[in-house]
Image (cartoon, rainbow, N blue to C red):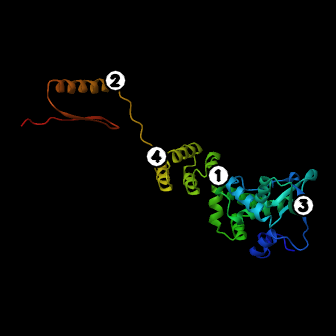
Amino acid sequence: MKHPFSRFFGLGEKEEQQKEMEEPNKNDEIMKLSISDIVPNRYQPRTVFNDDKLSELAQTIHTHGIIQPIVVREYESGKFEIIAGERRFRAMQKLGWETAPAIIKDFNDTETASVALIENLQREELTPIEEAIAYGKLIELHQLTQEALAQRLGIGQSTVANKLRLLKLPQEVQQAVLNKQITERHARSLIPLKNPEKQIKLLEEIIERNLNVKQTEERVVRLLSTEQKPKPKRKAFSKDMRIAVNTIRQSLSMVTDNGINLDSEEEEFEEYYQFTIKIPKKK
């Protein structure tokens, strides 16, 4: 029998591996294991399990039973670690089942992690952050480049690169993506800011003001423009200049108090202070 998801390791076809992982082999014995003896996969990339969808799955299992057993491996102290099928396991827990149908495989840590990661990636139900974490773990486990991983998964290298960039964002931003408070495109828009404090501050603004992606990108451009072109520091007023400016202001107030309408503007420049006075001619 080929290794489940063997294409990832350079063998077989994707459809065959999916079938091999999901359907028991003729030689595989389906065991009834105590639910209390089964533990979640340590390498599970999914961190958010939708309770409503789990309830729907539980109802389906209650009505039709388990079509596909979960896949486990022997763990420590008489326990069994899930390799594939954690959602089914959680649904059975919801139903209060005492036992679960399972196939026991002899997998090592690397194989267990790889199967769990790839199974979830192929189901396309992970959040962008969970997907990025899965890519990162696969690269680490198999010492791959981004390009090599992309080839093995049948996706573009840019897809892998863009997902991994999300992991460089502050934890607050990543959590907002996980909680679906912002989209992946929102998060990617924050990357050019680089400064974590500014990224978090803009994240708060996105959520508070419900900014769309275009508005977020425009906000980032303005912030970057401000960073690149700092405003020149204004020269401090000397004592004599303050006296002169205040004297002119008092004079203008006296003219206005005497019933003469005038229009005055004040402008401060780097080298000087300017008053513009307009006195309308009487008709």
Q: CA distance from mark 4 to mark 2?
A: 31 Å
Q: Earlier in the sequence, mark 3 or mark 4?
A: 3
Q: Residue at x 81, y 68 (%)?
A: 21
Badge 1 is on which residue? 178
Q: Is residue 171 visible?
A: yes
Q: Residues within 10 Å of mark 4 (few under 14, many from 20)?
A: few
Badge 4 is on which residue? 226
In which quadrant of the rendered view does residue 17 lie? bottom right
Q: Residue at x 89, y 74 (%)?
A: 26
Query: What amino acid type is highlighted by mark number 1?
Result: Leu
Query: What amino acid type is highlighted by mark number 2?
Result: Lys
Badge 2 is on which residue? 239
Badge 2 element: helix
Q: CA distance from mark 1 to mark 2?
A: 57 Å
Q: Nearer the viewer, mark 3 or mark 4?
A: 3
Q: Earlier in the sequence, mark 4 or mark 2?
A: 4
Query: What amino acid type is highlighted by mark number 4?
Result: Thr
Residue 52 percent coordinates (x, y)? 67, 54
Badge 1 element: helix
